[in-house]
Image (cartoon, grey):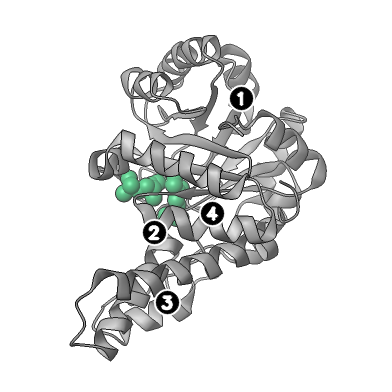
Amino acid sequence: MPLVTTKEMFAKAYDGGYAIGAFNVNNMEIVQGITEAAKEVNAPLILQVSKGARAYANHTYLTKLVEAAIIETGLPICLHLDHGDSFETCKSCIDGGFTSVMIDASSKPFAENIEITKKVVEYAHDHGVVVEAELGALAGIEDEVQVSAEESHYTRPEEVEEFVAKTGCDSLAIAIGTSHGAYKFKPGTKPQLRFDILDEVSKKLPGFPIVLHGSSSVPQEFVKMINENGGNMPGAIGVPEDQLRQAARGAVCKINIDSDLRLAMTGTIRKFFNDHPDKFDPREYLKPARAAIKELVKHKLVDVLGCDGKA
Ligand code: G3H
Ligand code: 13P
Ligand code: ZN
């Protein structure tokens, strides 16, 4: 099976009341952990690659790893550019075999966001590729861009119809209180997504797939594992999984998760070295790290996204 776009995945997810997991990939063990989990529960997948991932691992290595995962699993997999920052980055991924790209011009003024997004959509659609765009600004770090809590702002529902009509984008990422990274909410406060905004957006765009970025839930077992094995991550807090489940039942068709995989991998490796200070074979510590990613992703697919059995 070749790489697929998100068109059919999202249509089924919207109607079925579940979401597709979009997991960031940076190396072979991460690709294997995610795709082995999806294979076991028969889930469709979006594997996404950031600008930083391309700089780290190289475009060709990443696309070939994803192609290998398709051969090994036979699953419908979409290869997506995460947070494309310019027409040129999007074009390079479209020309290089991706089936979906995100153009993230959310930090630009509304009219400029429309203009850049429209240009990417025209090129992408001519090449059979779908486009995710973003309205609203999430706090946190993406590549080198740090958006402070003060600069972040929720999506304005009154803008979404015009934006989608003028750009022709295929899905829309919105800001309803999620943020990138492991420190999403102030310790001691109750994390709460703005479902009122999501409801308003979905009423204005019936049947249209909505995307949530910054949706790691920061499992405390891994934060504890990191802190107990020489790390220092006090106050790391994520999005409650029941709220993600609720979003997935509605118009949200794609949920982005990266930080949780990083925590699982790093916690497991830190513990391994604490338990085995004499070991130095990378296979010995990458194997349990890959297994931890697999277990985490299986849990997300089944208990949070509800996309198991939908491949
Ligand atoms: O939204 C950002 C993703 O977690 C990717 O992070 O840009 O460090 O690869 P990265
Ligand atoms: P997290 O940092 O919450 O995992 O978000 C990842 C993301 O949105 C990738 O685009
Ligand atoms: Zn993101």
Estimate the spatial distance between the alpha carbons at disc 4 and disc 3, rounded to whole Å: 21 Å
Image side of residue 167 versus residue 93, left or right: right
Q: Nearer the viewer, residue 287 or 19?
A: 287
With respect to residue 304, does 133 lie above or below? above
Q: Nearer the viewer, residue 303 or 282?
A: 282
Q: Is mark 1 within 8 Å of ligand 2?
A: no
Q: Is mark 2 within 8 Å of ligand 1?
A: no
User: Given the image, on which type of amino acid does mark 4 rest?
Assistant: Thr
Q: What residue do we see at 40% from left, 27% from top?
A: 105
Q: Which mark is residue 35?
A: 4
Instruction: From the image, state whether disc 3 or disc 2 is nearer to you.
Output: 2
| First in sequence: mark 4 vs mark 3 | 4
SS label for mark 1:
loop
Q: What residue do we see at 51% from left, 31% from top?
A: 135
Residue at mark 2: 29
SS label for mark 4:
helix
- Labels 4 & 3 near each other (Cβ < 8 A): no
Q: Is mark 4 within 8 Å of ligand 2?
A: no
User: Given the image, on which type of amino acid does mark 2 rest?
Assistant: Glu
Image side of residue 114 versus residue 92, left or right: right
| First in sequence: mark 2 vs mark 1 | 2
- Image coordinates of residue 3 in percent, x first then y, are 56, 32
Image side of residue 181 versus residue 129, left or right: left
Residue at mark 1: 170
| First in sequence: mark 3 vs mark 1 | 1
